[in-house]
Image (cartoon, grey):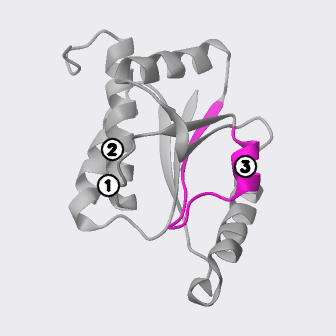
Amino acid sequence: MKISFWSIGKANETYVKEGVEEFTRRISRYYKVEWSIIPVPKNAGMLSEMDLKKKEGETILEWLNKDDYLVALDERGKQLSSEELAGFIQARANESIKHIVFLIGGAFGIDERVLKRANYKWSLSQLVFPHQLVRLILAEQVYRACTILKNEKYHHK
């Protein structure tokens, strides 16, 4: 199974870049993994919130393949413990899912058409985090899930 992390926005800021790269490298011991930063539309400042989300959504839907398993990070999604996330990832592997995409939306969230396409909606927390930190948290939690599945020491409970 391949894991992709997609995020709308700018490249990683230096304060998160090292951490994201480190956890991504660690995940690569378990799964093929990659990051894609989806650029904000060129005229984003001129667009309404709804139009911006729509444009971002069009790009995401173009990038997705029909068999991709899309996990949309959304504040209205289901919250999972680290153990539940591990079980979720294992269940996708058991279903022979070839490609799972974790999507971090833009500043105003994810377009409804993309949310309808999503196979799963996941909320990291009821708290609001900067998108840059969400990238780091997501990478760390997926790595933690991998170590839980392998019964390795990283996760203590």
Q: Is residue 21 magenta?
A: no
Res. 64 mark: 3
So how many labels did they put on this image? Answer: 3
Q: CA distance from mark 3 to mark 2?
A: 23 Å
Amino acid type of the residue that numbered disc 2 sits on in the rendered structure: Ile
Which numbered disc flags the more N-terminal residue, 3 or 2? 3
The single residue placed furthest to the right in the displayed view is 66
- Quadrant assignment for the N terminus: top right
Q: Are marks 1 and 3 in contact (CB under 8 Å)?
A: no
Q: Which residue is mark 2?
A: 137
Q: Quadrant of residue 84?
A: top left
| Residue 156 locus on image (x, y percent) | 19, 16
Q: Which residue is mark 1?
A: 133
Q: Which residues are magenta?
A: 99-118
Q: Indicate the secondary structure of the residue bearing disc 2.
A: helix
Q: Nearer the viewer, residue 128 or 90?
A: 128
Q: Is residue 71 above or below residue 49?
A: above
Q: Indicate the secondary structure of the residue bearing disc 3.
A: loop
Amino acid type of the residue that numbered disc 1 sits on in the rendered structure: Leu
| Residue 93 locus on image (x, y percent) | 59, 18
Res. 110 mark: none
Q: Are marks 1 and 2 in contact (CB under 8 Å)?
A: yes
Q: CA distance from mark 1 to mark 2?
A: 6 Å
Which residue is rendered at x = 38% and y = 17% of the image? 83
